[in-house]
Image (tube, grey):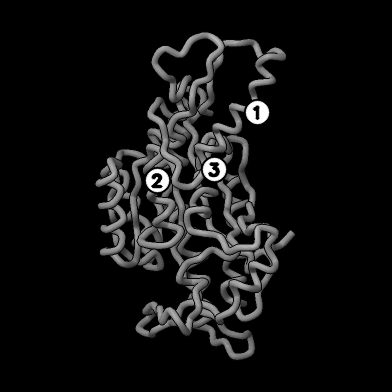
Amino acid sequence: MASHDDGGGGGAASGRRAPARLARLADQLAPGASAPRGRGPQGARVGARAGVGAGEESRPGPLLEGEVAVITGAGRGIGAAAARLFAKHGARVVVSDLDGDLASAVARSIREAGGEALAVGGDVTEPAFPGRLLEAAVGRFGDLTVLIPNAGFTHDGVVHKMGDAQFTSMLDVHLTAPFRLIRAAAPYMRDRAKVEARRLGRARPRCILNVSSTSGVHGNAGQVNYGAAKAGVVGLTKSVAKEWGQFNIRCNCLVFGMIRTRLTGDREVQGESIRVNGSSVRLGIPGGMDAAVEAMSPLQRVGSPEEAAGAMLLLASPLASYITGQAVEVTGGTHL
């Protein structure tokens, strides 16, 4: 775990400084925060400044230095915000999206900002795509340490009017696709970890971040298909955490509430849609939901993609090294 080494023995003076250190670490997790340079999470020190003397505080460095992150659905919204934030914190990022042009644009923006990124377009519901995606990632960057199956869309409807195809479309993209990605990651995460454990005594840390929703944890009228799939993501997460924890691979999921993306925009105003099996599916929700969420939230506002990405950074970072198997709600407090 990346930490600052003050060279002391943890006495009273060290204890008084701890809140200040934690505050600076929290600042590093703030969306848009720039990451100071330094050795990564595997190093003994991070962000050390030249001339730092005894008793002086050093700043935390990039939280994901040396990591290779694959993020699907990263052409826009939460995925794009996460890709850019992870790159700022030192990760080499594979940006994947159904729209290859959008993926390329996000990857290009990362490279222009001084980061490293590869774009891979494709459909996560295609059975062979996970293997191709991860092969491309490891072929380019040599490793896979953070996997985020984030791609998805909504296809809302009430239960008594919903056909089988509409129901299973949500299972395909939100539950089966993450399962296939995790299975395809086994040679690069689980198997490599076993080799490292034999050679070094312990494998390097790796993690998987799945994406669930309050619709999956608390239910939502008109989203029986989406809610069922996102509930399944929680079970998938906990099961993988129990299977792969012995290989130093953590698995958590983020339970997002109302985050401002095209999936939560006013469908009548934004006019967004996606093609699924040859048919057009309108995206968004009924107008006026923002006001309802603001009334429910102690923070009295809807979340941003950058705030959602900040939660992803937290769980992917060494600061969360003892957190696994959890469904972490990122809701602004709407379901307290």
Amino acid type indicated by mark 1: Pro
Mark 3 packing: few (<14 Cα in 10 Å), some, or many (20+)? some
The residue shown at (51%, 65%) is 260
Please state which amino acid type lies under the numbered disc 3.
Leu
Name the mark nearer the viewer: 2 or 3.
3
Between discs 2 and 3, the one toward the N terminus: 2
Whether residues under marks 1 and 2 lie with C-beta atoms below 8 angstroms apart, the answer is no
Look at 46% across and 57% down and name the residue there.
149
The answer for how far apart the CA atoms under marks 1 and 2 are is 30 Å
Q: Quadrant of residue 86?
A: top left
Residue shown at 61% from the left, 11% from the top: 8
Name the mark on residue 69.
2
Residue 235 seen from this side: no
Q: Residue furthest top?
A: 54
- Left or right of residue 121, residue 46 in this image: right
Residue wearing tag 3 = 314
Name the residue rendered at 49%, 21% in the picture.
58
Res 81 visible: yes
Crowd rating for badge 2 (residues with CA inside 10 Å; few <14, some 14–19, many 20+): many
For marks 3 and 1, the one nearer the N-term is 1
Q: Position of residue 166 (x, y in %)?
A: 51, 82
